[in-house]
Image (spheres, grey):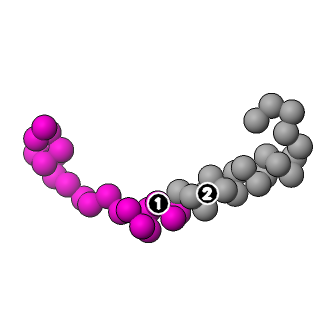
Amino acid sequence: MENASPEEQELAELLTVLIGDYEERRYPIAKASPQQTCNI
């Protein structure tokens, strides 16, 4: 973020962490074996 205040930068970082946490909880990625990941 260009020209962002330190507070705005901290808020952007906080939102990034919160969104990442939400996505991990709401849309978890199932574990897969190497063979499963290569099947396209």
Q: How many numbered discs sit on the rendered protein?
A: 2
Check whether the beta carbons of the residues at disc 2 and disc 1 lie within 8 A of each other.
Answer: no
Could you classify mark 1 by the number of other residues whose Cα lies within 10 Å: few (under 14), some (14-19), or many (20 or more)?
few
Residue 35 in the figure: left or right of residue 32: left
Task: Point out residue 22 in the picture as x, y percentages from the top left corner.
Answer: 51, 64
Query: Which of the labelled discs sits on residue 35, or is there none?
Result: none
The verdict on residue 31 being magenta is yes
Task: Point out residue 11 in the picture as x, y percentages from the top left corner.
Answer: 76, 54
Residue 19 in the figure: left or right of residue 31: right
**Residues under labels 2 and 1: Cα distance?**
10 Å
Could you classify mark 2 by the number of other residues whose Cα lies within 10 Å: few (under 14), some (14-19), or many (20 or more)?
few
Q: Residue at x 13, y 48 (%)?
A: 36
The verdict on residue 24 being magenta is yes
Quadrant, the C terminus = top left
Residue beneath disc 1 = 23
Quadrant, the N terminus = top right
Q: Residue at x 61, y 62 (%)?
A: 18
Frontmost residue, 34 versus 8: 8
Residue beneath disc 2 = 17
Task: Point out residue 21 in the picture as x, y percentages from the top left corner.
Answer: 53, 63
Q: Which residues are magenta?
A: 21-40
- The image shows residue 11, relative to residue 40, as above or below, that is below
Task: Point out residue 9 in the picture as x, y percentages from the top left corner.
Answer: 79, 46
Q: Residue at x 42, y 67 (%)?
A: 26
Q: Quadrant of residue 17?
A: bottom right
Say what amino acid the circle numbered 2 marks. Val
Q: Label 1's element? A: helix
